């Protein structure tokens, strides 16, 4: 019964690697969306500063 053990270990290693990959991809996506939100918030502020009459 030593043959199924390496298969189980490799399956767990692959599952862990897949989880880490998904987590890093999700983290990168949230960082991109946060950068977009910050840039969208800065644009109206800069336009208001350039137009002191408003």
Image (spheres, helix red, strand yellow):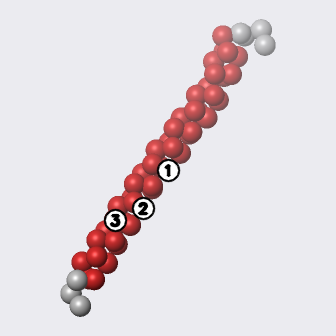
Query: Sequence order check: which comes first, mark 3 or mark 2?
Result: 3
Question: In the image, which is nearer the foreground, mark 3 or mark 2?
Answer: 3
Number of residues whose C-alpha sits closer than 10 Å to that of mark 3, classed few (under 14), some (14–19) or many (20 or more): few
Q: Given the current orientation, which residue lies at the most extreme left position?
A: 2
**Viewer-side label of 1, 3:** 3
| Residue at image mark 1 | 26
Which SS class for mark 2? helix
Give the residue drawn at x 56%, y 39%: 34
5 displayed left or right of 48:
left
| Residue 12 percent coordinates (x, y) | 34, 72
Q: CA distance from mark 2 to mark 1?
A: 10 Å
The picture places residue 22, in percent across and down from the top left corner, at 45, 55
**Residue 52 vs residue 9, the one in the foreground:** 9
Res. 19 mark? 2
In the picture of the structure, the residue carrying the numbered disc 3 is 14
* Element at label 3: helix
Q: Residues within 10 Å of mark 2 (few under 14, many from 20)?
A: few
Among numbered discs 1 and 3, the one appearing first in the sequence: 3
Q: CA distance from mark 3 to mark 2?
A: 9 Å
| Closest to the observer, 14 or 23 | 14
Q: Residue at x 28, y 83 (%)?
A: 4
Question: Could you tell whether 3 is left or right of 12 in the image?
Answer: left
Q: Quadrant of residue 47?
A: top right
Instruction: Identify the image quadrant of the N terminus.
Output: bottom left
Circles 3 and 2: CB distance less than 8 Å? no
Residue at the spot 51% in from the left edge and 43% down from the top edge: 29
Helix, strand or loop at label 1? It is helix
Q: Spatial distance from mark 1 to mark 3, Cα to Cα?
A: 18 Å
Q: Is residue 32 left or right of residue 41?
A: left
């Amino acid at each position: 019964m030593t043959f199924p053990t390496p298969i189980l270990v490799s399956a767990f290693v692959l599952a862990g690697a897949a989880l880490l990959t998904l987590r890093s991809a999700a983290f990168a996506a949230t960082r991109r969306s946060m950068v977009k939100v910050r840039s969208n918030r800065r644009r109206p502020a800069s336009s208001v500063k350039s137009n002191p009459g408003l």
